[in-house]
Image (cartoon, rainbow, N blue to C red):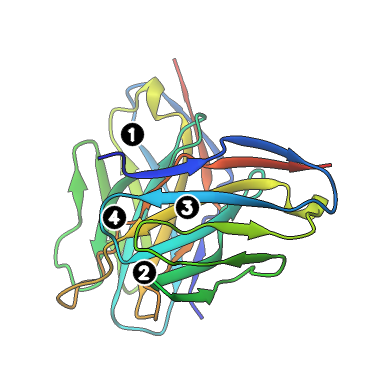
Amino acid sequence: AQKITQTQPGMFVQEKEAVTLDCTYDTSDPSYGLFWYKQPSSGEMIFLIYQGSYDQQNATEGRYSLNFQKARKSANLVISASQLGDSAMYFCAMSYNNAGNMLTFGGGTRLMVKP
Amino acid sequence: NAGVTQTPKFRILKIGQSMTLQCAQDMNHNYMYWYRQDPGMGLKLIYYSVGAGITDKGEVPNGYNVSRSTTEDFPLRLELAAPSQTSVYFCASSPGLAGGSFYNEQFFGPGTRLTVL
């Protein structure tokens, strides 16, 4: 069975500094995808970044990058130059070969950016 | 495009009451999902659908039912509400995987906050 683990329930970061949010996953499938979503206090789920298991390079989207270490089964999210608006819950998720193209979500990390 | 819409935004139910949470999408997506999110937790899949007329259970289906008569709509029915069903419910849709990729971005609705007292 697939499993996503986010071991940091909460983190603080100083504004303008970089922060890494950890995500480890467990799967026996060689083919899968990894996602990060942001959930601000308003509650909506916002897609941030995607990494495929066969992608050769780490994904980047603006200030977000994904540090993908396949052998370690980790897919950490790096946010550079943190902003106050980055304060939110962040969820790591995985897609894999299943009938409903379902995503498996981790428990989330709450990031708080200090001014 | 409105994307994924959900109604109502908030609802308070008494124990034993029933209700339907509405979800609609206008992106012509085949795949639709219902999740629940308990306070401080991640999302758990309740039911999903791969197309009109086809639904299947997710991780936590007990106490819920779904139907999918059209591509656009995917209502979630709660029968005999219990306090354990107090949660935020999210509906999501996706076009599904294509071309051997596992890129399956799911587009989420704004959520329905349900309290059962």
Q: Nearer the viewer, residue A32 or A102?
A: A102
Residue that sits furthest to the front in the current view: B69
Relative depth, front residue between A76 and A49: A49
Q: Residues within 10 Å of mark 4 (few under 14, many from 20)?
A: many
CA gap between label 4 and label 2 equals 17 Å
Q: Nearer the viewer, mark 1 or mark 3?
A: 3
Residue A56: x and y in percent read: 14, 67
- Crowd class of label 3 (few under 14; some 14 to 19; many from 20; radius 10 Å): many
**Residue position marked by numbered label 1 in the rendering:** A18
The residue under label 4 is A67
Q: Amino acid at mark 4?
A: Asn
Residue drawn at x 62%, y 67% is B65
Residue under label 2, please give it: A95
Q: Which mark is residue A31?
A: none
- The chain letter under disc 1 is A
Question: Residue drawn at (52%, 45%), measured in percent from left and top?
Answer: A109
Residue drawn at point x = 42 percent, y = 56 percent:
B73
* Spatial separation of the CA atoms under disc 1 and disc 3: 32 Å
Task: Tell if the residue under mark 3 belongs to the same chain as the one under mark 2.
Answer: no
The relative height of residue B54 versus residue A47 in the rendered view (above or below) is: below
Real-space Cα separation, disc 3 to disc 4, in angstroms = 29 Å
Point out residue A112 in the picture as x, y percentages from the top left corner.
50, 29
- For discs 3 and 2, the disc positioned in front in the rendered view: 3
User: Where residue B23 sits: x, y (%)?
Assistant: 47, 50
